[in-house]
Amino acid sequence: MTVAIEMGHTTAGASAALDLEELLATRLLVQGNSGSGKSHLLRRLLEQSAPWVQQTIIDPEGDFVSLADRFGHLVIDADDHTERGLQVAGERARIHRISTVLNLEGLDAENQMRRAAAFLGGLFEVVRDHWYPMLVVVDEAQLFAPAVAGEVSDEARKLSLGAMTNLMCRGRKRGLAGIIATQRLAKLAKNVAAEASNFLMGRTFLDIDMARAADLLGMERRQADAFRDLERGQFMALGPALSRRPLGLRIGPTDTQPRNATPRLLPLPEATLEDARAVILAAPPPENTRPQRRSSPDLLGQLMAAKSAALEIRPEAAEQSLSAEELAERRERVDQILCAVMAEPDAGFRAIGVLYQEFVVRCRIAGLGSAVPDLTEFRRMLTRARAGLGSDVAEDDAWQDVSIRASILPEDMQGVFMMIARAAKEGWPCPNDAAIARAYGSHSLRRARRLLTYIEEQGLIVCQLDGAGRRIVTLVELAWATAPGDPNAEELPVD
């Protein structure tokens, strides 16, 4: 049975329907400048489809929290929870088929990206048994999948972009239908936008955005100016779930209203200059009188209470019931899975968040769901793996000092330092520039050389060249030194 969602009316007055089953298979991109009616369109789509399919909304401004009262969505205030908590919440929300609104209001750009990536990762990583159909709406998608680097850290950008790429590129097979809305197509990563097959293009004024919108709809460039003339709530539609040819439509009314309504013009209050001075320039209140933030109810408790489910076994309890031999065997299996992930082509150049998602899925397929390390522990494991070390290194006293020294470096450099330390301890040739760049997650040999210079400036190593131009690296105080190695070698040294 085909489920048709009524979105409004065409410019000819006919009913404009959206095929929900087709949308689940083909994804949707919405574009329009501020005030074009994007949020109203998303709200209409969510309201009409709520009885039919599970939903989650990544909401950077808190506009969609009002859906909770009318349709029972669980509102998750991201500011009240850790990234790990949000990841687990995403998994459990999908397992128990609870529609949610991830409210990111009040967070800065970097924390919005990190928490959204964690929650999307939880939705994506759930085991195959729970791959139920789900609409995943991301408002202001250019914030989470930017076309160029901004002021946020590279790590946060890679995590968020990796999660958005997974949603749009690999989500369909997992039942996730991405619906992304943006003010500026030019600011949205092209690999994310390109995965959508359905388009709703609203009012746009900048030439570069109009040109991209026209290209996506198959219109000629000279027709792009038509996007300037669209009224609020009017969109051009194209795609298998909407229309096989560009079609103008007007979005219908909604049952709920955004919490943040558009400001209206109001007359200024009548006040004398003396009154205004007394109010505006009054002494500020003491800082200790600032009201404390109220504590929020436990997020995971809310999810579990939303729908009854079987009791899950905690990893800590499972570990207590295992013998030392079983624990050692399980750690070995986890190490093997990590090695398999790292053996994939270009694994050294993928974002940590993407690697972690792949790692979690493999662990669960292998029946190690209760033994999956959290993201923090995975980072440490990844650092050791890039240095060619197993988890048993943590129990080796000879490496304790190395780990302490590595900790003073930025996280993405620690694996490089430990790789060099391993070569020095074993007396192997110094890793070449290509190996150092790969361990750092880069293709740039120049960056590898700058990285060594930085580590040397921190007083951790001393780099020297012998008469043949081969590099020798010595660890300060430990007196471990690598054998001479050619920094320009094309192949990695053999362990």
Image (cartoon, rainbow, N blue to C red):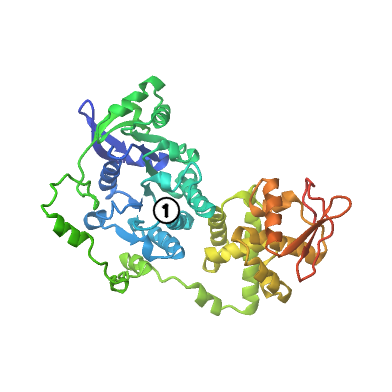
Q: Which residue is mark 1?
A: 109
x then y, percent, for residue 101: 33, 55
Q: Quadrant of the N terminus?
A: top left
Mark 1, Cα crowd under 10 Å, few <14 / some 14-19 / many 20+, is some
Q: Amino acid at mark 1?
A: Ala
Question: Is 385 placed above or below 203 here?
Answer: below
Work out whether residue 17 or residue 211 is closer to the camera in this orientation and state it.
211
* Residue 255 visible (yes or no): yes
x then y, percent, for residue 378: 57, 63
x then y, percent, for residue 335: 65, 64
Point 37% across, 24% down: residue: 224
Residue 238 position by quadrant: top left
Whether residue 475 sits left or right of residue 346 in the image: it is right
Looking at the rendered structure, the secondary structure element under dot 1 is: helix
Whether residue 302 sits left or right of residue 490 in the image: it is left
Q: Quadrant of the C terminus?
A: bottom right
Whether residue 293 sits left or right of residue 472 in the image: it is left
x then y, percent, for residue 271: 12, 54
